[in-house]
Image (tube, rainbow, N blue to C red):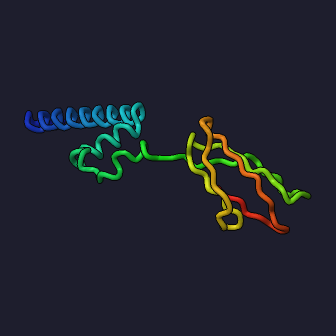
Amino acid sequence: MSRRSRLSLRTERKTRKTIILTSLGILIIVILLVKFGTNILVGFSVFLAGNANSLPSGSKNLNSNYITPPTLNPLPLATNSAQIVIAGKAEKQEKIILYINDNILDNTVADNNGIFSFSQTLTQGESRIKV
């Protein structure tokens, strides 16, 4: 039966302790990532990148300057009348420009509820309508 020296036993205990502490640390990090997810990753990346005030000036107020695009009410796929009403919803008091086949035909301002409408005469054939 071979005996181990005290030095090898001490080294083995130290190695075992290091492995246990490392495994525990990894487990805690995994639990935190699962619980807090991307918030921790984003915060950590901002921390690593430096001060959050070092962002370009145009990106600081990006959300406050965002204007949602207007949406159109469903239009008929085909019509037997040349006259059509194009309506939809946008931000209140937003200027709406009507394009038919990539040509600007009209513009209006949405009311206080964000509702707008156009009355247009279409030509025969396909018409691509955008606002």
Vertical comparison of 99 with 46: above or below = below
Which residue appears at 80% of the width and 66% of the height? 126
- In what quadrant of the picture does the N terminus appear? top left
Vertical comparison of 128 with 32: above or below = below
Could you tell me residue 123's position as x and y percent? 82, 66
Which residue appears at 19% of the width and 38% of the height? 15
Q: How many marks?
A: 0
Vertical comparison of 99 with 5: above or below = below
Could you tell me residue 124's position as x and y percent? 85, 68
Relative to 119, is 41 on the left or the right? left
Could you tell me residue 97's position as x and y percent? 62, 56
Relative to 35, is 51 on the left or the right? left
Relative to 129, is 78 on the left or the right? right
Q: Indicate the quadrant where residue 52 lies.
A: top left
Q: Nearer the viewer, residue 96 or 78?
A: 96
Which residue appears at 36% of the width and 32% of the height? 32
Q: Indicate the quadrant where residue 40 lies.
A: top left
Could you tell me residue 11's position as x and y percent? 13, 38
- In what quadrant of the picture does the C terminus appear? bottom right
Which residue appears at 24% of the width and 33% of the height? 21
Q: Nearer the viewer, residue 83 or 10?
A: 83
